[in-house]
Image (cartoon, grey):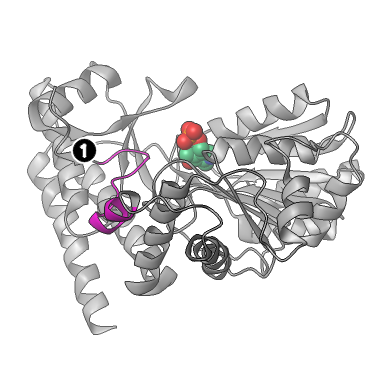
Amino acid sequence: MRGPDFTLTAGPTMASDRVRAALGGPVLFDYDPVFLERFRSLEAKIADLLHTEQDVVLMQGEAVLGLEAVARALTAPGTKWLNLVSGVYAMWFGDWLRSFGAEVVTHEVGFDEAIDPADVDRILAEHGDIERVALVHSETPSGIENPLREIGPIAHRHGALMVADVVSAFGGCEVRVDDWKVDLCVAGPQKCLAGPPGMSIVVVGPRAWKAMEANPSAPRGSFMSLLDWKARWVDTDKSAFLYTPSVSDVNGVDAAVDEVIETGGIEASIARHELAGRATRAGVKAMGLELWARDERYAANCVTAVRCPEGVGTAQVLAHVRERYGVMLSKGYGPLAEKLFRLGHMGPAARSFYPLVAVTALGRGLADLGVKVDVGAGAEAVAQVISEGAAEAATA
Ligand SMILES: *Cc1c(COP(=O)(O)O)cnc(C)c1O
């Protein structure tokens, strides 16, 4: 089978020419001064993009490595967590916490809506002894964004650590780690940043380090140990790795970060994703389809989730669109697999008319299979929003 002409999925995203070239660059000795300097400066550039002065640890493994490392490092038997669940990734994070012996208070809302900060405030007050709060900022499997900006300070007021999964938020929506009182977060390069999958970006603040150091159950002497990174890398002159970093991945992520910096910076990147999300939602609605998000205020900038209409299956539609038109889209994930489609607009797919391709491919594919949709109205709506956004950006 031929590769796709367009990858407009929920991640990993298409990498740019520059990122692909970097991935194919020389594989340097990890203690070569050029590589050491690249690794250190990559940490600093990422800290800038996330608006933080806290420590950045680049773990060599896809973001799930960082998330599991964090769950283990901050959990001893009986550690009391509040897990805020509005989607699949938060649900899975809770499974980890329980399996490591945590006492987990779960606050779950429908997967088509966001967490209300007032509920977080109330639950923390009711319990009084919750030590950590976990939130997924942008729930990629359902295209829902949670108000981390408001929830972080609430967790702090109640004396709890704020722990966030910002994997698909990074680069696509605002993430201000320090201003929002986030003690620990995990980001990924393979979503809105458009880097290769293979790295966990973990930001750790002083309160989180202290909690880990006080935790006898936190991994030590392990590939998954954040404390090892602190002892051997963060607290030293940063000249001794724990293990050989994935050199090509570091090169690729470095190129992705430079590309963001050199094409208008993080604000421009966020604006592109915001516009692509708005255009996609307008197109979906104009075609006569229903957004998954119960309220558009909850919709994420990274992917647009669309309810699957009656009479067709998600796998059937995606296979048809991929086979006939060479466009790869995503379905839902886990318990949402059969309920929704996801049109990804991350990284390069947030640029230009890519959203038009995604909306038209889904609409035309559904029409081919007998669903009544107005493809023309959808296309017109996408183009209209993109045109207005491009005009605004040109005069800004
Ligand atoms: C992509 C992503 C991860 C990493 O999970 P994979 O399925 O292994 O890519 C974690 N959290 C969120 C919110 C993500 O979007």
> Could you say which is closer to the camera, residue 297 or residue 101?
101
Instruction: Name the secondary structure under disc 1.
Output: loop
Write the residue at 40% across / 64% down.
Answer: 270
User: Residue 260, image x and y in percent?
Assistant: 38, 66
The answer to whether residue 19 is magenta is: yes
Mark 1, Cα crowd under 10 Å, few <14 / some 14-19 / many 20+, is: some
> Could you say which is closer to the camera, residue 238 or residue 168?
238
Write the residue at 39% across / 45% down.
Answer: 196
Residue picked out by circle 1: 288
> Could you say which is closer to the camera, residue 37 or residue 12?
37
Q: Quadrant of residue 148?
A: bottom right
Magenta stretch, main secondary structure, is loop
Mark 1 vs ligand 1: CB below 8 Å: no
> Could you say which is closer to the camera, residue 369 or residue 326?
326
User: Residue 103, image x and y in percent?
Assistant: 84, 29
- Tell me which amino acid carries mark 1: Gly
Write the residue at 16% across / 66% down.
Answer: 387
Write the residue at 27% across / 54% down.
Answer: 21
* In-image side of 4 versus 238 (left or right): left
The answer to whether residue 304 is magenta is: no
Q: Does any portion of residue 36 appear in the rendered image?
A: yes
* In-image side of 203 versus 19 (left or right): right
Magenta region, residue range: 8-22
Residue 128 sits above or below residue 251 on the image: above
User: Residue 231, image x and y in percent?
Assistant: 79, 53
Q: Quadrant of the N terminus?
A: top left
- Residue most extreme to the bottom: 395
User: Residue 199, image x and y in percent?
Assistant: 51, 45
Q: Quadrant of the C terminus?
A: bottom left
* In-image side of 384 versus 261 (left or right): left
